[in-house]
Amino acid sequence: MMRYLMLVAGIVLLLVQHFVATISAETQLFIFLGGIIVLGIPHGAADMLVANQTANIKKIGFSKIYFLVKYLFRLGSFAAMFWFFPVIANFLFILFAAYHFGETDLNNFKTESFAGKLFVMSYGMMILGVILLSHFNDIIPLFYLFESGRANETLINFISEYRYTILSVLTVFFFAATFIYFTSTEKASFHNDHFLMQLAILLFILFYMPMVIGFTFYFVVWHSMLSLKNIVHYLNINSKLSNTVIIKQLILYSSLAMVGILIFGWSGMMFVSSDAIMVYVFIGLAVLTAPHMQIMYDMYNSIRSQKKANSK
């Protein structure tokens, strides 16, 4: 039901954008930042709670200090990669984000096999491909804010020229991976038989929505809402944490994350322009992807293991 409500909201927003009143760039940025604060950051701020729950389920020890040190090390390593090897870092970010998005959206599918993981990756690549490639001309000026972007102008121009060819390849990859998955996975189902219909509507919204609003709709509304729903359900296993405690913890860790982002942004001249704000928020999300994806990957593995154990 939640997915249908979000899709309806997306269609309404799309109709407003194209037939009622065009959403200004300033309003898009305001909606984006507001969504990041309200939903985007909280779904990532739950990482310590999720990691602790995974340790409890596996019946192994958990140290907050060790967790934070390892988390910050991964974060710092990925940030350093963005600084010294931006092209490689962006490529890895796209792969990490694609798998993470696919794993969240396809949580109800059995994806333990190689075919399942291929299915997950192809799904996430399709989502990112539609968001980024169909609006690539809007993204190019953001690359040129940095010396590394200007230094890789040839690569950027190549992607811009062949963006729809690349998107077509990703589409073929997705349908091939989907076919392989459903023909090789025993008892695989389309889960209410609406999987492809939901995806088609979602991609339609993302393709025709402006890039900022489209990314906001997918990342903040769609992905973060589904993630928070899964996270709360996971943390409620064995009823060790009440929803009130979970909400209080999310508010606390979200506040700490916001302080860190503001310090990072202020030191990096984040607030000199709206484009700079957008770029630094994207970089912040990219840097957080590496440690966050691992924790969520462990969570979904734990959920699948419990489902398998309960079905026996």
Image (cartoon, grey):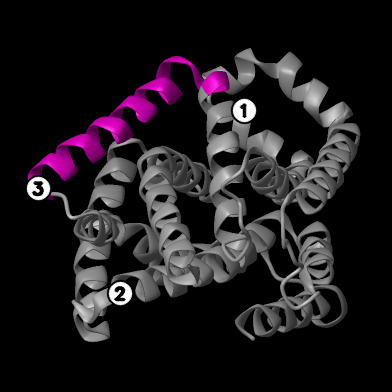
Observer-nearest of 86 and 98: 98
Q: Residue sitting at 54 percent across and 29 percent down?
A: 92
In this rendering, does residue 271 appear at all? no
Q: Residue sitting at 19 percent across and 68 percent down?
A: 252
Observer-nearest of 46 and 195: 195
Q: Where residue 69 appears, x then y in whole percent?
A: 15, 37
Q: Which residue is mark 1?
A: 144
Q: Amino acid at mark 2?
A: Ile
- Mark 1 is surrounded, within 10 Å at the Cα level, by few (under 14), some (14 to 19) or many (20 or more) other residues, namely some
Q: Where residue 64 appears, x then y in whole percent?
A: 11, 50
Q: Which residue is mark 3?
A: 63
**What is the spatial separation of the Cα atoms under label 1 and label 2, in whole angstroms?**
47 Å
Q: Amino acid at mark 3?
A: Ser
Residue 161 located left or right of residue 126: right
**What is the spatial separation of the Cα atoms under label 3 and label 1, in whole angstroms?**
42 Å
Q: Which residue is mark 2?
A: 237
Bounds of the magenta span? Answer: 61-88
- Mark 2 is surrounded, within 10 Å at the Cα level, by few (under 14), some (14 to 19) or many (20 or more) other residues, namely few
Q: Where residue 54 appears, x then y in whole percent?
A: 27, 56
